[in-house]
Amino acid sequence: MIRSRIAGVFFCLILGAGAALSQTREAPSASATAPSDESRAALKAIAGEGFLNSRSFEYLTQLSDEVGARVTGTPGEARAVEWAVKTMKGLGLENVHIEKWQMSHGWTRVAATVELLSPIRRALTVDSMGWVGSTPLGGVEADLVPINVFDLENELKNNSPGWAGKVLLMVQKGAPPKESSGFLARIGSLLEAAHRAHAVAIIGAQGDAKAVGVHLTHTGILGFDRFFDIPVVSTTAEDQAQLERFLDAGRPIRLRINVQNQMKQGPIEANNVVGEIRGRQYPNQVFVVGAHLDSWDLAQGTTDNGVGTVCVLSAAEAIARSGRSPLRTIRFVLFTGEEQGSLGSFAYVKQHQEEMVNYLGDLVLDSGQGPARGFNLGGRADLVPAFLKFVQTLAVFGPLKVNDNVEFGTDTGAFIVAGLPGINIVQESPTAEYKFTWHSAADTLEAVKPDVLIHNATLMAIVSYWIADGPERFAAPVPPEKTVQMLIEKHQDGFLKAVGQWPFGEGKPQGTAKPNP
């Protein structure tokens, strides 16, 4: 059923792309990135391989069932790295290798339980957040008090003296803060203050975002490359709601909480996995196609971000099997440490800092299992017209929107601050299934439709080849001062400074070297 459906889609693609590209020949684009006849032929060959010979769901099954969860710095990550290297070599990629980097702490989940003792007695469903501490062995009995995450300044100033010996429940009362830095930029002060005040632990979904789905918890970080000594757990929407009802009714809550995690002081070694298809004319000019290989550990990590990992591998396979080589090098990179603050991609950019002048940018898929619906070009408004003109020729993929929005929730961010287009593939899923599977026990293979996976992988292959094979270079780094101006205009400077990923200092940024032609 799937194979015959894909064959029909491919037939439509050839007809649709042929008509669109014929129209392009009749009315040439002013953009120097319009594909040549040779490039058009390559794109059709890549589309054929992507749609008709895809092994993407086979790879995703291996990653989900045989490798499983892969938290950075754990044996799961090591298994994933070994699998990725073997797979890249099997695809025939060149220069396959790992690149080591380090993070400040290692962390392993052990167990977390909460038992409600009064006003009724029952077990709550909880899971520890990542990179947080433990209660004493055996757990602690304590009363529960609410803290309003929409009014943290008041909580810290006026209520923290009463937190000693208490478990804190994050609630949302009133209007959310107007400032745009986001919860991760504000939570650190709360966690540190709660620990200083001798609070026992904190319960809450993810602070300003309650858990979604039926009886699901959602784990995750609470600071970029930061460890917090106080235990913090996520609970389900149902349990959270009951606790809040008790508190609103003035009914005292007492519970027993036991959270055990293992923290290892760093530096902790981690690995990015790299392979490439060398450019036939400008091999030193590099376009990165990437996704994060690491995951959380409540399930298989299939939708976050197994699908992105497999799209990268399948895009590489489609291009390799087509027998075509682009003018410039396409480097396929599977980053680790993304779930701790895009650490692997920032490490990659730092390690290749001297070469960034010759990079074209990166392309990332990391929004779950939904079909691609467009592209964010990472603050590069200058690239939108040419990019939009090209994707409009790909009618079979449906309407694809293009804008210059920036995304710092994934591995585009490091390239954006380097002045390059960090291109994020926008997917339908954030408003559909992904909000349930994200960081939860539902992040499994069953959530993924094979035809959507093939659709996204093939689109990634086509777009990455077009960028790498343009008659003129698609993009080069802009000067740091221009990047700073863009980030301020898009209100990202406060967030980046708060999470420690603002590289420009307080003074005027320095200039950048000129790229090779």
Image (cartoon, grey):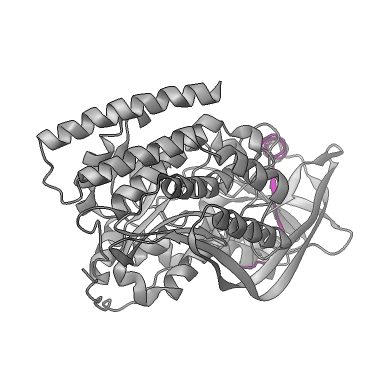
Residue 81 against residue 372 in the figure, above or below: below
Residue ID at (34%, 61%) = 279
Residue 53 falls within the magenta-colored stretch: no
Quarter of the picture containing the C terminus is bottom left
Residue 243 falls within the magenta-colored stretch: yes
Residue ID at (32%, 41%) = 43
Q: Nearer the viewer, residue 319 or 206?
A: 319
Quarter of the picture containing the N terminus is top right
Judge from the rendering whether residue 479 lies leftward or rightward of residue 255; answer left or right: left
Q: Nearer the viewer, residue 40 or 113?
A: 40
Give the number of callouts. 0
Q: Which residues are magenta?
A: 226-244
Residue ID at (46%, 66%) = 498
**Quadrant of residue 23 in the image?**
top left
Residue 443 against residue 362 in the figure, above or below: above
Judge from the rendering whether residue 351 lies leftward or rightward of residue 515; answer left or right: right
Expressed as whole percent of the image width and height from the top left, the position of residue 72 reads: 64, 62
Residue 370 in sight in this render: no
Expressed as whole percent of the image width and height from the top left, the position of residue 480 reads: 27, 71
Q: Nearer the viewer, residue 18 or 140?
A: 18
Residue extending farthest to the front is 323
